[in-house]
Image (tube, helix red, strand yellow):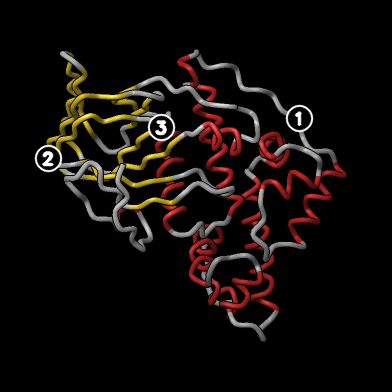
Amino acid sequence: MREDALVDISAIADLPVSNDPLAVLAHIPGSTACLPVSVMPIPGNGRLINEGHPHARIYVAESGSGRRWYRKGSRTAQLQTAPLMIEMCEKGLSFDECRWEGEAGRCVLIDLLDSDVESHSHGEFNAINLPTRHELFDEKVSTIALELANQALRGLPDGRLYSQGLSMTLLGWLGQHYNGGRRPTEPRRFGVLGSSQRARIFDLIRSNLGQDLSLQRLAGEVGLSPYHFSRVFKATFGISPHRYVQMQRLDTAAKALRGDHRKSIAEIAVDHGFSSQSHMTELMRRRLGVTPRRMRTGSS
């Protein structure tokens, strides 16, 4: 895979399309906050010889449509391409020739290296042995993959807690439903946080709203692994840790907007853990139905 010039963009749709199947439209290396993400072209008219997949990986089409052909030896598979369609590739998969015809588009590629799988699932999975699947639709996988890519391309504006949760949820779903081609297993049942644990988590969050909180820090406060903590937390509060922290930030920011007129809206946004004033404005409008300016003035 060839990495071409990386560009400063804010969403997958801002990237150009290309008929070069080896072009890398954007690449964000893996980190403790996010699985490695690349955006690749879906050629409108392209051909590739000796295509190989060294790791288990998934592709999710963001745009583009048409037909493609994968040839291995004397056998050729003719497939369709459509937005939100998923392709899963097992480790070591290879084709002698690949061809594309249709409307050019883009897809998100997430590599599932064993080290990243173990790190982001916090030991729940040592590896995810995906089977090869073509023309697959799974709303859970496509939604998470596209959101993770858009977050990564924008520099994780919603913070580590959100991207870690997305990465972990994706791995959990793939591990439960596709790992090694096994039948889905019954979801594990998790308990709930005790009253003292809830109080400790609440105090930690409220005293660190301006910080980029992580699952590791929250889980460590109550002595749980991040993977176990995120599930126990949702069983306790009915929402994810990220959504809970987001609502706490919005609540305290709203009180500051109404009561502290010495600080600008931008300062209040940063003080309460938002990446920018526009980020707080977007979330406040979406979650509370009001802008920070109207919150401050008390106008309807």
The residue mark sitting in front, 1 or 3, is 3
Q: Amino acid at mark 3?
A: Arg
Q: Name the residue located 35 percent from the left edge and 52 percent from the top edge.
A: 26
Say if 259 sits above or below 91 in the image: below
Tell me, for residue 191, which label it has, or none. 1
Name the mark nearer the viewer: 2 or 1. Answer: 2
| Type of the residue with mark 1 | Gly
46 lies above or below 153 = above
The residue at which mark 3 appears reads as: 57
Q: Nearer the viewer, residue 57 or 157?
A: 57
State which tag comes first along the sequence, 2 or 1. Answer: 2
Would residue 114 be found to the left or right of residue 4 on screen? right
CA–CA distance between discs 2 and 3?
23 Å
Tag 1 secondary structure:
loop
Could you classify mark 2 by the number of other residues whose Cα lies within 10 Å: few (under 14), some (14-19), or many (20 or more)? some
Marked residue nearer the N-terminal end (2 or 3): 2
Which label is found at residue 95? none
Residue at point 61% right, 38% down? 119
Relative image position of residue 61 (x, y in whole percent): 30, 39
| Spot occupied by residue 97 in the image (x, y as percentages of width and height) | 18, 27
Residue 63 image point, x, y percent: 26, 44
Q: Amino acid at mark 2?
A: Asn
**Eyeballing the image, is 265 above or below 13?**
below
Q: Are marks 2 and 1 in contact (CB under 8 Å)?
A: no
Category of crowding for the residue at label 1, using alpha-carbon neighbours closer than 10 angstroms: few (below 14), some (14–19), many (at least 20): few
Percent across and percent down for residue 189 are 69, 24
Which numbered disc flags the more N-terminal residue, 1 or 3? 3
Per the model, the C-alpha gap separating discs 1 and 3 is: 32 Å
The quarter holding residue 296 reads: bottom right
Label 3 Cα neighbours within 10 Å, binned few <14 / some 14-19 / many ≥20? many
Q: Which residue is mark 2?
A: 45
